[in-house]
Image: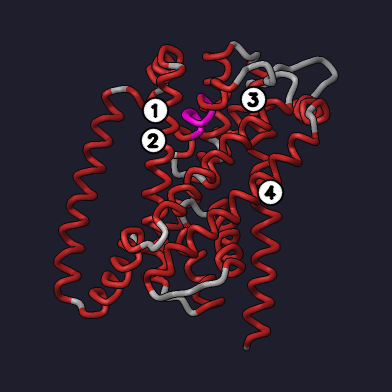
Amino acid sequence: MAPTLKSTLRYLGMLVLAAALVWLSLKGIPDVEGESKAVFLWQTWARSNKWYLMVMAGAAMLSHVLRAYRWKMLLAPTGNQVTLGNSFLSLMVGYLVNLAVPRGGEVSRCYNLLKLQQTPVEVSFGTVVAERVVDVLCLIALIAISFFVEWDKLMAFMGALPMSSGGGLLKGLAIGGMALAALVVAFFMVKKNEKVRKIVAGFKEGLLAVFRLKHNFTFAIISILIWLLYFVMSYLVIVAFPETKGLGLSAVLTLFAMGAIAMAVPLPGGAGSYHTIVPLGLVMLYGLPQGDAIAFVFIFHAWQTFIMIVGGLLSLLVSYWMIQWRK
């Protein structure tokens, strides 16, 4: 099967799976006589405190600005001095692409930065990978804290998930074996291909930029602030809804852990997996009625997605205008 056709079929398969999971989640909303599921979702939205949601949107944009500044810091040791504006525009374009193509935003934001400021893609992509490593460490720390706070509840929740079975372990080992084989093949390809060696050298330069930072403390503080803002965003959304505002701060940490499990599934924008796993956790861990849990998660995810779409589209338009103006 041709690689393009195979990729297309795989992408279509992910879309079908995401749609199926969303549909199954919607079925969990109770049927009330004279009230459709859409009306139930709308009424949940109507009961929300819009002021909290607007503040949450502001916190989201501030986190994106800090992330763009952190990326700018990572690119500096590679000899690429980019502006904060171009870094921010490229970052938001990447978020927009990620909603349609899982993990596609990491590459698209590098290409956008190339068009805006002639930054080599292989170098900027290396810094993106380094950035992801830092984010994973921050996420692991948050998940560890959430398990420490809610150990019994989260372990019971993890045990109830299908991925906790032995079959999942075997699948993980198989994927690890294939990844190792791919690395071996890539190693021999790099040794024989000069062009590939140059690309790998650029990627390595970007990846190791984190060790050549002039302001390590500032970089660490910004990384912590980004994740603190994510915590604040989740808290603001939880207190914005009457059904969830009494859950407390521990529920925000738990939401992080459940969200991380859901977003690990490679579906566009986490659609489907987020709508299935997070409501299940809210029902199991906090006794939230199933309909309320599903409605909350749908609106939470939709509001986050709306912010990214608006910010991404505006950034795409501004980037296009800047590129055309320079030409």
Residue drawn at x 31%, y 59% is 211
Instruction: Determine whether the residue tagged by mark 3 lies in a helix, strand or loop.
Output: helix
Residue 120 is situated, as x and y percent measured from the top left of the image, at 41, 75
* Callout 3 amino acid: Ile
How many residues crowd mark 4 within 10 Å: few (<14), some (14–19), many (20+)?
some
Residue projecting furthest to the right = 34
Q: Magenta stretch: dominant SS?
A: helix
- Residue at image position (26%, 30%) is 169
Q: Dividing the picture into quarters, in which one does residue 19 lie?
A: top right
Q: Nearer the viewer, residue 199 or 227?
A: 227
Location of mark 2 (residue): 140
Three-letter code, disc 1? Ala
Q: Earlier in the sequence, mark 1 or mark 4?
A: 1
CB within 8 Å, label 1 to label 4 = no
Q: Are marks 4 and 3 in contact (CB under 8 Å)?
A: no
Q: Viewer-nearest of labels 4 and 3?
A: 4
* Range of residues picked out in magenta: 254-259
CA gap, disc 2 to disc 1? Answer: 6 Å
Q: Which residue is mark 4?
A: 307
Q: In the rendered structure, are the residues bearing label 4 and label 2 in contact, judged by CB atoms less than 8 Å apart?
A: no
How much space separates mark 3 and mark 1, taking CA atoms?
Answer: 26 Å
User: Which residue has dot 3 on it?
Assistant: 294
Nearest to the eye among marks 3 and 1: give it: 1
The CA span between labels 1 and 4 is 28 Å
Task: Point out the frontmost of discs 4 and 2.
Answer: 2
Left or right? Give the position of 177 relative to 43.
Answer: left
